[in-house]
Image (cartoon, rainbow, N blue to C red):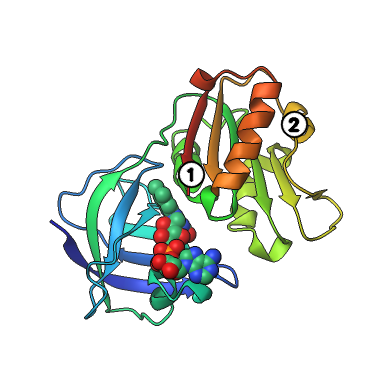
Amino acid sequence: MALAVKIISIEHLTHDVLKIVAEKPNNIAYNPGQAVDVSINKAGWEKELRPFTFTSLPEEDQIEFNIKTYTSHKGVTNELLSLKPGDELLIGDVFGDIAYKGEGIFIAGGAGITPFIAILKHLQKSQQVGNSKLIFANKTKADIIDEGFFKKLLGSNFINVLSDEKTPGYEHGYITADVIKKQITGHDYFYLCGPPPMMDAVEKHLASLGITSDRIVKEAF
Ligand SMILES: Cc1cc2nc3c(=O)[nH]c(=O)nc-3n(C[C@H](O)[C@H](O)[C@H](O)COP(=O)(O)OP(=O)(O)OC[C@H]3O[C@@H](n4cnc5c(N)ncnc54)[C@H](O)[C@@H]3O)c2cc1C
């Protein structure tokens, strides 16, 4: 059964990504990297469930989502743009295939970063960041979610790849096998999340580098 929770704050993180902080439903349990079905508690929208990933940690008193909005879809993410503190979300079932298994390279495209925000926050808190690396693909610098957080946490282990912009200090183009190969220094796992075409391409690169599927943890957005 879906539980109604009030939005505490709603603000733009980037030009098209919202950060929504809401009340935590009673008895909800989730692991860093997991998602939940969410709808808007507003006439006509209650049954429009969409999956979003918790960017908060399970032990926090509030829940948080980072949500990329698509105005052209005229769907739930567009409708979220009209919400304000005090409005309600309906929180349903928790699920998700991404869970931390051990040190690795996180590879994300766009909003596919959200499970890794939660996992890296967890690793930071438990002092297990170690040699974790993040390769993050976006169109432009303005699309990068939480750039400051990742830079501070990972330093040179944070690699940005921009497809539509040439910026000094940032890789240009798509994530290639070569971009990944340069970062592999005995990593056990490869965590992968993003839009299906990006995932397909990256999985082919990983296969070409001899990475077997048992070392890949993934979810398509
Ligand atoms: C497990 C999981 C976790 C996720 N977590 C997150 C997260 O934390 N943050 C995040 O930002 N996203 C996340 N996503 C992706 C997110 O769920 C989708 O972006 C969201 O469902 C889009 O909802 P929407 O109603 O706005 O659009 P949609 O449901 O994609 O589309 C609504 C309607 O718009 C039309 N439409 C579809 N595509 C187009 C198009 N290209 N152009 C024009 N019209 C179109 C169709 O008629 C469709 O029915 C996650 C996805 C999964 C699977």
Look at the picture and state if 20 lies above or below 138: below
Q: In this view, does 13 lie to the left or right of 168?
A: left
Name the residue beneath numbered marker 2.
177
Q: Residue at x 75, y 54 (%)?
A: 163
- Residue 17 visible in image: no
In the structure shown, which secondary structural element does the residue marked by tag 2 occupy?
Answer: helix
- Between 118 and 172, the one nearer to me in the picture: 172
Residue 17 location (% of width, % of height):
53, 67
Which amino acid type is shown beneath numbered disc 2?
A: Ala
Spatial CA distance of label 1 from label 2 is 19 Å
| SS label for mark 1 | strand
Q: Name the residue: 57% across, 18% down.
A: 212
Looking at the rendering, which quadrant does residue 142 occupy? bottom right
Q: Which residue is located at x 79 percent, y 31 percent?
A: 178
Q: Name the residue located 55 percent from the left edge and 46 percent from the top edge.
A: 196
Q: Residue 30 carries which label?
A: none
Residue behind mark 1: 220
Residue 132 appears at what percent x and percent y? 60, 31
